[in-house]
Image (tube, rainbow, N blue to C red):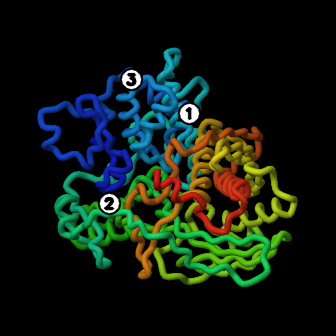
């Protein structure tokens, strides 16, 4: 049954493998078989057809599934929940992680499906829904080929590990730079000596010092885990072309340097058999690319210095940053730590855009206490203006986004990507980061230790899209930078991100 996904391998923390045992949701990866002997177990494929069709139709209508890796488990849990209000849905979603959608579209879909008047459309969305146009917008925003439609909600997006032929050997990292190979995943992991990951409890490190100078604003950031749900996987026949680890997107560019495809090809050729390569969550954190740490000082006139942890491709991060803020001198600095990538969402460019937007705001006197706006134009020519309003606790209460992305193609799909970008931006400023040891090896290895905002912590995001006939452009990166800048300004421009990590991990 391929709808049941493995997102944390097995930590019991992502919810992707949720099934119903006698009607109650259970996380399959940490549920021993002896606990379900003689009991009915339902995957999303076996749900009551009417219940499933209502949820799937509502998910497509609201763009509540992007890569589709997390949604089969979420649909199972919502099916067990039945009709519920927003508070009950947000509580139910505490058992899940969605990295793509920003939660709000999932909440909208759950409430729509529970409404007695909702009648799901046979195509899974609504009259006038153009699946091809929606897929084109999703591909523009995600940077990789994407499908859109009911099958994606049900986990049928063609993920690499789902498409592997029967009888493959299985290979996993052995912890020493090589690969342990077995007839089954369990055998390979046993050979590798896999140890379950933990949250370290260590404080975050800031590997780059703020440059010396007379600055109006300074900022330091740390390593941020992309936290895509589908861990790296590939497979290959001898002499063949390895399957992409980003088969339906959902990786935000971080898988471009994944070791899985090359390993699958080399091992298939060596063993003369098809080989599946599967990383565990711990492997993905240790080996996968991160958002580069940064340190900067900037003056109100937009001049200053931005330091970025150096990636393997020299000059790419610096060029991206200079395109957003030409007045910044950009330095790429080698640091001891996990690999970083210029392909992670708007890396380098977003840091520079945020600094410049904040300097402009500070130079203009800023906004009212607890509220701020920021405007950003992306290298692709999309524009985004964001406003963030804080509540009495200093937590985001509401986010407004106004964007020009050229021809929307599918406003539902575009809105989903914009809300997801806003969620990721808030997490970047408020809570996200991973602890890295003195030897440069990540020590926070569990899904819950990354600081990704939960559904309950994510404010509503109101989106206005300018309908134009211009060439469609990626807008989610501009939205990401604009929301991050507005949140930072609203919080009073503290000198280190994340600003409220203890608040999120402690609750």
| Circle 1 crowding by C-alpha within 10 Å: few under 14, some 14–19, many from 20 | many
Q: Are marks 2 and 3 in contact (CB under 8 Å)?
A: no
Q: Secondary structure at mark 3?
A: helix
Q: How many marks?
A: 3
| Circle 2 crowding by C-alpha within 10 Å: few under 14, some 14–19, many from 20 | many
Dot placed on the residue nearer the N-terminal end, 2 or 1: 1
Can you identify the residue that label 3 sits on? Answer: 51
Dot placed on the residue nearer the N-terminal end, 2 or 3: 3
Q: Position of residue 496 (x, y in %)?
A: 63, 68
Can you identify the residue that label 1 sits on? Answer: 62
Q: Position of residue 359 (x, y in %)?
A: 80, 65
Q: Position of residue 444 (x, y in %)?
A: 41, 66
Q: At x 55% / y 37%, what residue is drawn?
A: 105
Q: Is residue 41 above or below residue 164?
A: above
| Circle 3 crowding by C-alpha within 10 Å: few under 14, some 14–19, many from 20 | some
Mark nearest the camera among 2 and 1 is 1
Q: Secondary structure at mark 2?
A: strand
Q: Is residue 400 above or below residue 61?
A: below
Residue 193: tell me if it is visible. yes
Q: Secondary structure at mark 1?
A: helix
Kindly indicate the quadrant of the structure image that contains residue 272. Answer: bottom left
Kindly indicate the quadrant of the structure image that contains residue 401. Answer: top right
Dot placed on the residue nearer the N-terminal end, 1 or 3: 3
Depth check: give the residue in front, 164 or 459.
459
Depth check: give the residue in front, 100 or 93.
93
Could you tell me how far apart the alpha carbons at marks 1 and 3 are, in whole angstroms? 17 Å
Quadrant holding the N terminus: top left
Task: Identify the disc placed on residue 235.
Answer: 2
Could you tell me how far apart the alpha carbons at marks 2 and 1 are, in whole angstroms? 33 Å
């Amino acid at each position: 049954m391929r709808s049941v996904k493995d997102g944390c391998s097995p930590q019991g923390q992502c919810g992707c493998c949720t099934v119903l045992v006698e009607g109650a949701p259970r996380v399959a990866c940490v549920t021993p078989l002896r606990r379900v002997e003689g009991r009915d177990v339902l995957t999303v494929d076996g749900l009551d057809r009417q219940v499933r069709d209502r949820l799937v139709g509502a998910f497509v209508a609201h763009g509540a599934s992007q890569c589709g890796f997390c949604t089969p488990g979420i649909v199972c849990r919502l099916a067990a929940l039945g009709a519920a209000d927003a508070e009950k849905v947000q509580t139910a979603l505490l058992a899940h992680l969605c990295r793509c959608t920003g939660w709000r579209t999932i909440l909208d879909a759950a409430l729509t499906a529970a409404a007695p008047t909702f009648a799901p459309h046979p195509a899974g969305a609504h009259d006038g829904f153009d699946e091809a146009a929606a897929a084109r917008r999703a591909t523009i925003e995600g940077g990789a080929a994407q499908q859109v439609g009911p099958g994606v909600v049900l986990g049928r997006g063609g993920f690499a590990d789902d498409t592997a032929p029967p009888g493959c050997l299985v290979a996993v990292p052995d912890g020493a730079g090589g690969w342990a190979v077995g007839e089954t995943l369990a055998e390979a992991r046993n050979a590798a000596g896999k140890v379950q990951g933990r949250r370290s409890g260590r404080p975050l490190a800031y590997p780059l010092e703020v440059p010396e100078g007379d600055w109006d604003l300074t900022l330091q950031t740390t390593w941020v885990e992309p936290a895509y749900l589908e861990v790296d996987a590939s497979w290959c026949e001898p002499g063949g072309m390895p399957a992409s680890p980003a088969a339906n997107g959902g990786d935000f560019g971080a898988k471009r340097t994944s070791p899985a495809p090359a390993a699958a090809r080399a091992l298939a050729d060596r063993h003369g058999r098809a080989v599946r390569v599967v990383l565990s969550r711990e492997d993905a954190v240790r080996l996968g690319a991160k958002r580069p740490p940064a340190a900067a000082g900037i003056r109100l006139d937009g001049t200053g210095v931005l330091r970025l942890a150096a990636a393997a491709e020299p000059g790419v991060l610096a060029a991206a940053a200079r395109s957003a803020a030409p007045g910044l001198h950009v330095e790429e600095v080698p640091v001891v730590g996990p690999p970083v990538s210029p392909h992670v969402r708007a890396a380098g460019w977003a840091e520079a855009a945020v600094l410049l937007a904040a300097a402009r705001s500070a130079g203009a006197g800023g906004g009212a206490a607890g509220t701020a706006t920021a405007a950003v134009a992306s290298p692709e020519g999309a524009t985004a203006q964001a406003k963030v309003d804080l509540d009495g606790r200093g937590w985001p209460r509401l986010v407004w986004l106004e964007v020009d992305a050229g021809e929307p193609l599918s406003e539902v799909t575009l809105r989903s990507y914009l809300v997801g970008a806003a969620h990721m931006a808030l997490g970047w400023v408020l809570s996200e980061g991973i602890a890295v040891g003195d030897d440069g090896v990540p020590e926070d290895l569990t899904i819950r230790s990354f600081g990704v905002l939960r559904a309950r912590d994510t404010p509503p995001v109101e989106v206005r899209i300018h309908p134009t006939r211009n060439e469609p452009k990626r807008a989610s990166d501009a939205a990401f930078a604009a929301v991050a800048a507005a949140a930072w300004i609203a919080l009073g421009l503290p000198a280190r991100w994340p600003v409220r990590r203890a608040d999120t991990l402690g609750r």
